[in-house]
Image (cartoon, helix red, strand yellow):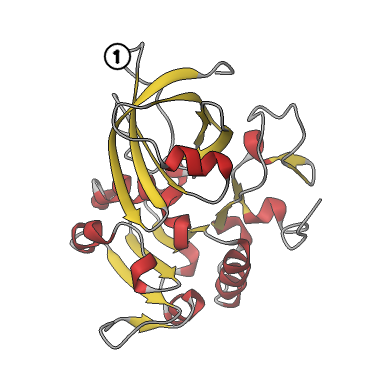
């Protein structure tokens, strides 16, 4: 969908400072287009511009979308200030998401850093609702500080169904969890290498080191998937802003199998 459609905010949740989750519904339609975990919408703040934001809600929802966004620029700042009843423009869904069909029967290793948990939450919600279809599910989540961790209220529910480990770079004396970098958790993890698929999302430097750690544990590149973020403008591969090697992240990604992008994964600009 290339023409923005009008949506209205029906719920606003402040997750952590400068980061909100907006639940939005179409103004002129009863139902929304289905999406796959890992895809994104282009959200348009009237008078402010348009930005790509991944879905962060359950793909089973049929009447609303959820998007978690951080105020880091003019457009995302404007969107983050929207209140219940305010309107915005929406184009989408766009992109290629996580390989959900390939996860069936596999041990699923989810590695998320910071805001990178948001594009993986639809995956987690799907897996938690049908754990019997997977050989095992592990979630490793890392953040800078405890007060910057997303969705903490949901972790109790997730922990009742899957294995969850959280780590932060630094914390005060009231933090009883792991302290360090997320690769420490990955390095000590036990999983069946021959039957595991890893999904990785977060800052690029975090993803690079996570991939290296997975490789050191003999997980093949064909079993590693990453979600990339670059400057997407048109979302349909026409403008060229998000060209990355031979690919356009907006239509060929944002999720890629690492085996397909290994030769240019470590290059900052292409």
Q: Which of 223/10 is in front?
A: 10
Residue sitting nearer the eye, 102 or 150: 150
Q: Is residue 35 above or below residue 125?
A: above
Whether residue 154 is visible, yes or no, is yes
Nearer to me, 72 or 55: 72
Residue at (25% x, 84% y) in the render = 174
Lateral position of residue 65 relative to residue 270, left or right: left
Q: Is residue 88 left or right of residue 213?
A: left
Q: Residues within 10 Å of mark 1 (few under 14, many from 20)?
A: few
Looking at the image, residue 99 sits to the left or right of residue 133; the answer is right
Q: Quadrant of residue 236?
A: top right
Query: Quadrant location of the N terminus?
Result: top right
**Relative to 210, residue 51 above or below:** above
Residue at the image position 49 percent from the left and 65 percent from the top = 194
Marks counted in the figure total: 1
- Residue tagged 1: 30
Q: Secondary structure at mark 1?
A: loop
* Furthest residue in direction top, as rendered: 28
Residue 123 on image: x %, y % = 38, 47
Residue 96 visible? The answer is no
Is residue 249 shown above or below 237? below
Residue 169 location in percent, x, y? Answer: 45, 79
Q: Nearer the viewer, residue 107 or 147?
A: 147
Percent position of residue 210, x then y: 56, 70
Q: Say left or right for 161 vs 140.
A: left
Residue 8 at x, y = what percent? 35, 24
The residue most toward the bottom is 173
Decide: is 70 above or below 50.
below
């Amino acid at each position: 969908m290339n023409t923005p459609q009008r949506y209205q905010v029906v719920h606003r949740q402040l997750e952590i400072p400068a980061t909100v989750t907006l639940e939005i519904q179409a103004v002129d339609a009863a139902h929304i287009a289905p999406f796959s975990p890992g895809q994104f919408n282009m959200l348009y703040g009237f008078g402010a511009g348009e930005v790509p934001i991944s879905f962060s809600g359950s793909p089973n929802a049929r009447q609303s979308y959820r998007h978690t966004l951080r105020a880091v620029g003019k457009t995302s700042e404007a969107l983050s200030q929207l209140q219940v009843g305010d309107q915005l423009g929406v184009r989408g869904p766009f992109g290629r998401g996580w390989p959900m069909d390939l996860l069936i029967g596999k041990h699923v290793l989810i590695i998320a850093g910071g805001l990178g948990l948001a594009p993986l939450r639809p995956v987690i919600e799907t897996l938690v609702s049908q754990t019997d279809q997977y050989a095992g599910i592990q979630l490793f989540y890392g953040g800078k500080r405890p007060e910057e961790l997303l969705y903490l209220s949901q972790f109790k529910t997730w922990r009742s169904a899957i294995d969850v480990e959280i780590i932060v770079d630094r914390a005060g004396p009231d933090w009883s969890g792991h302290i360090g970098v997320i690769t420490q958790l990955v390095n000590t993890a036990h999983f069946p290498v021959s039957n595991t698929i890893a999904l990785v999302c977060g800052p690029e430097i975090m993803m690079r080191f996570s991939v290296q750690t997975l490789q050191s544990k003999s997980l093949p590149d064909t079993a590693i998937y990453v979600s990339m973020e670059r400057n997407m403008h048109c979302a349909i591969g026409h403008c060229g802003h998000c060209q990355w090697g031979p690919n356009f992240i907006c239509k060929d990604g944002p999720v890629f199998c690492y085996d397909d992008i290994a030769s240019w994964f470590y290059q900052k600009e292409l």
